[in-house]
Image (cartoon, helix red, strand yellow):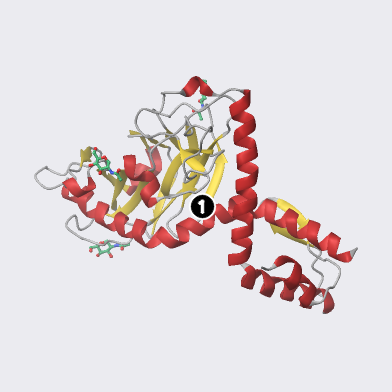
Amino acid sequence: MNSLIIRRLVFAMLLLNIPFLKAQSPTKGTSISSRFLDSVLQDYAFRSFSGHRQRTGVIYDGIMSPEFSGITVSALRLRSGRLRRKGYYGYKEFEIPGGVFVSPYVERLVLVYQNLGNWSSVYYPLPGYLFLSPVVGLLAYNASQLTAKRLPELDLRASENPILIKFESLGVPADGVLRKCVFFDLFGGVEFDRVLNGSVCSIAKQGHFGIVVRESVPAPAPAPAKIPENPIAVSGGGSAGGGKWNNEWWIGGVVAGVVWVVVVVGGLWAVRGCRQRRRIKKMEYEAEGGVPLAVAVIGSALVPVAMATRTKQVLENEYVS
Ligand SMILES: *[C@@H]1O[C@H](CO)[C@@H](O)[C@H](O)[C@H]1NC(C)=O
Ligand SMILES: *[C@@H]1O[C@H](CO)[C@@H](O)[C@H](O)[C@H]1NC(C)=O
Ligand SMILES: *[C@@H]1O[C@H](CO)[C@@H](O)[C@H](O)[C@H]1NC(C)=O
């Protein structure tokens, strides 16, 4: 009886945890390389100033070397006072309103724009999702030394209205597939938000941004006999096959998705067994110690975790492979 309750709770927790886990695990591994890319792209963007008169308020496009073909960068130098008062509308996809400021204070700053193009999912992999837009980045730097390399980012925040990102070219998803804005902060964190007006994301911080949809079949499926490659893939000719969505496909996709989720959950569960075990132990401890811990916040949902006290062996045998 008790084990059934625990099983249900654990299952609910896992279900609610899935987007979080999927979002977190890949970026943890790649945050170093994407941060290294930020520093490389800062250099490329700053180099676009050389040979110009370095006017403020003018967008300079960087020239990438062939090894980064597909990525574009730009640099925009602004007085921070002007940015705060007036914002800057139309920096590529970004509409920056007044009220945006950086800390620590600098008199002039450079806003580096990145468009990762076909490299988006290489540097920002998000298993279970497909990018409909390229990943674009907006990062703020001290403009005092335009030849500086490996500059740290300033902290950029919108204090009044959010910064809007207006994506132009989205791969066309099938009807009923929910688009989401995804936001990668500079510390490996991932957040999702709703899309405004079909292709607009709104944010208050710097980082990297894109629009994604949930993938309904596993991408690395070994030669699926009947299920076609997901037609909403954004790679180049994404429009081909867009009309193939029909009931059979949906049912197949949903079934495959459910199977896949079960497999993924099983895998994650095994990998995270140790951590879960520790967490469960802690919860038991807290339950036994009388610490008032009625609910835990998982995602945006409140899930009761004050489960009946169990021995560790039962949990291990049943849920940790
Ligand atoms: C992106 O496209 C360019 C050509 O435009 C190509 O050279 C590069 O290898 C591609 N990168 C990836 C990761 O596919
Ligand atoms: C900006 O760069 C200049 C020159 O390197 C330095 O003197 C100043 O302290 C920097 N400001 C901040 C906030 O890092
Ligand atoms: C959405 O579209 C409406 C009508 O075109 C427009 O008034 C509004 O500003 C748009 N919102 C955003 C966030 O772009």
Task: Say if disc 1 is inside 8 Å of ligand 1.
Answer: no
119 left or right, relative to 12 = left
Q: Position of residue 130 (x, y in %)?
A: 47, 39
Q: Nearer the viewer, residue 178 or 225?
A: 225
Which residue is under mark 1?
190
Outermost residue toward the top? 243
Residue most extreme to the left: 51
Tell me residue 201's x, y (percent): 49, 36
The residue lying at 65 percent from left, 43 percent from top is 258
Q: Is residue 182 left or right of residue 144?
A: right
Residue 282 place in picture, x, y as percent: 72, 75
Identify the element where label 1 is drawn.
strand
Q: Is residue 188 visible?
A: no
- The image quadrant of residue 180 is top right
Quadrant that contains the C terminus: bottom right
> What kind of residue is marked 1?
Val
- Which residue occupies the foreground of this view, 56 or 164? 164
Residue closest to the eye, 132 or 217: 217
- Classed neighbour count for the residue bearing mark 1: other residues with Cα under 10 Å, few (<14), some (14–19), many (≥20): many
Residue at left 30%, top 55%? 37
**Quick check: can you spot residue 240?**
yes
Q: Residue at x 69, y 51 (%)?
A: 15
Farthest right residue in view: 1
Q: Quadrant of the N terminus?
A: bottom right
